[in-house]
Image (cartoon, helix red, strand yellow):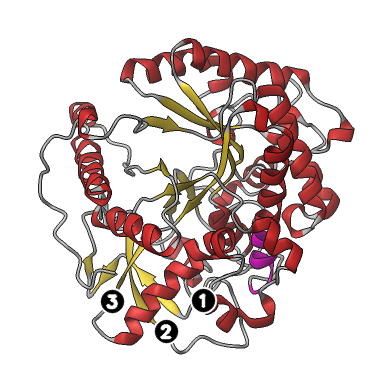
Amino acid sequence: MAEEAPDSSFIPTVIRRSTFPPGFVFGSASSAYQYEGAAFEYGRTPSIWDTYTHQHPERIDDGSNADVTVDQYHRYREDVDIIKKIGFDAYRFSISWSRVLPTGKLSGGVNQEGIDYYNRLINDLISKGIEPYVTIFHWDVPQALEDEYLGFLSEQIIDDYQDFAELCFKEFGDRVKHWITFNEQFIFASYGYATGLFAPGRGSSSKHFDYLCGDFEHKPHVGLVSRRGFFWKLLDCELEGNPGTEPYIVGHNQILAHAVTVKLYKSKYEYQNGEIGVTLNTDWYVPNSNHEDDKRAASRALDFSLGWFLRPLVYGDYPASMRELVKERLPKFTDDEVSLVKGSYDFLGINYYTANYAKNNPNVDPNKPSQVTDSHADVSTDRDGVSIGPKVRKDSWLAVYPEGLKDLMIHIKHHYKDPIIYITENGYLDYDSSDVEKLLKDEGRVKYYQQHLIKLHESME
């Protein structure tokens, strides 16, 4: 890991498609809840995100929801035409579980209108020469399953998820050759069950989020938090759940659901000649100082984000640092589960946006265990008041640090047996502006992508 943040302010040379080898895929990505709209039309039932945004609009900065959003359900042809015009090779999108299975269960019946919508989208993409990459699950558990057995807190969801995935293979696998079982298992487990910032909103405040609690009106400079295009705020930190156990249970069940689904695909649908993997996310972590304890903290921070979900797939168990610090709160894999999980991927998707400094924290309260603090590493984009990289706005979570993408690729190659990798997300957070000319030039985003593509190319050399 780098000990000092390099200068990210340079203007890179122009990078072209021809800079990359043949077979390198350029594409765009979305998720069902964020893009589709038509939330209560054509047989779709609520997901936990519908419930969360409708029951707790006070936790969303502007009180909005995704009932309509960009209305891709009705306007997908326009989106496909834009993807084609840009010149992308691929489009990654997710299937809304509750759109195709309104009760969340196969036994509750299939919504044909939902199936028809995805067939139209897939066919339109292929007709325009765009390869579909399909994410099976992107955080939107059917509310029916959340009501019945608390979703991914229950092992019951493994069978229901597998049925959902098999329905997708049967209906779309003749044309879809790239399957992603889960998107960002870490975010779903941590933000949904430790901090409560994402649906289903379980967990409790930790020292990292105390500033979100209490009298919001007197804390306007820290009240808004943004991540991956979501904006939210917390006014009340009394949440259901246990942040010291539930994230690990949810993470464990996601891993097992992934593994059984990969086994199913390999055993029953190999004739479709597709590939299947998972998309994980992580920031890169730079030691806050040259001290050994901060270097170890940076390593632990990476273990508790990337390693939490990748190490079981490669080696059959969680990172040693997690076993040491989380102890009995961390679920164990049986021998049969180790065999099931280990090697259960054809490729790895990686979502990378930014980097943080990591500082050792030896003073975690053992009486208030939380997944957020279990790593004993405090992370921040700033060190001594200076950001690790440029930001659009001082309070933004996204500091531009392209070197982190290169470091991450090299780390995965050397520590995780050099898998096939797709960068399934990478992007630039911007804010509303009345300056139309500046928006159209989009210089910050252009620079961000140029820098990251250059560093990605360097990691391949």
Coordinates of residue 7 in the picture (x, y in percent):
13, 59
> Could you tell me which residue is drawn at 32 percent across and 43 percent down?
428
Coordinates of residue 339 in the picture (x, y in percent):
69, 60
- Please report the bounds of the magenta region as a residue range: 244-252
Quarter where residue 65 is shown: top right
Q: Give me the C-alpha separation between circle 2 and circle 1.
A: 9 Å
Mark 3, Cα crowd under 10 Å, few <14 / some 14-19 / many 20+, is: many
Q: On screen, 269 above or below 355?
A: above
> Could you tell me which residue is drawn at 34 percent across and 44 percent down?
429
Q: How many tags in the picture?
A: 3
Q: Give me the C-alpha separation between circle 2 and circle 3.
A: 11 Å
Look at the image and say whether residue 419 sits in the magenta stretch: no
The kind of residue tagged 2 is Asn
Q: Earlier in the sequence, mark 2 or mark 3?
A: 3
> Could you tell me which residue is drawn at 74 percent across and 68 percent down?
335
Q: Is residue 439 left or right of residue 282?
A: left
Mark 1, Cα crowd under 10 Å, few <14 / some 14-19 / many 20+, is: many
Farthest right residue? 107
The kind of residue tagged 3 is Asn
Q: Nearer the viewer, residue 341 or 49?
A: 341
Q: Please give the residue where the numbered disc 2 appears in the rendered image.
A: 361
Q: For the residues labelled 2 and 1, say whether their Cβ atoms are less than 8 Å apart.
A: yes
Q: Nearer the viewer, residue 122 or 71?
A: 122
* Residue 271 visible in the snapshot: yes
* Residue 46 visible in the snapshot: no
Coordinates of residue 118 in the picture (x, y in percent):
63, 21
Q: Please give the residue where the numbered disc 3 appears in the rendered image.
A: 288
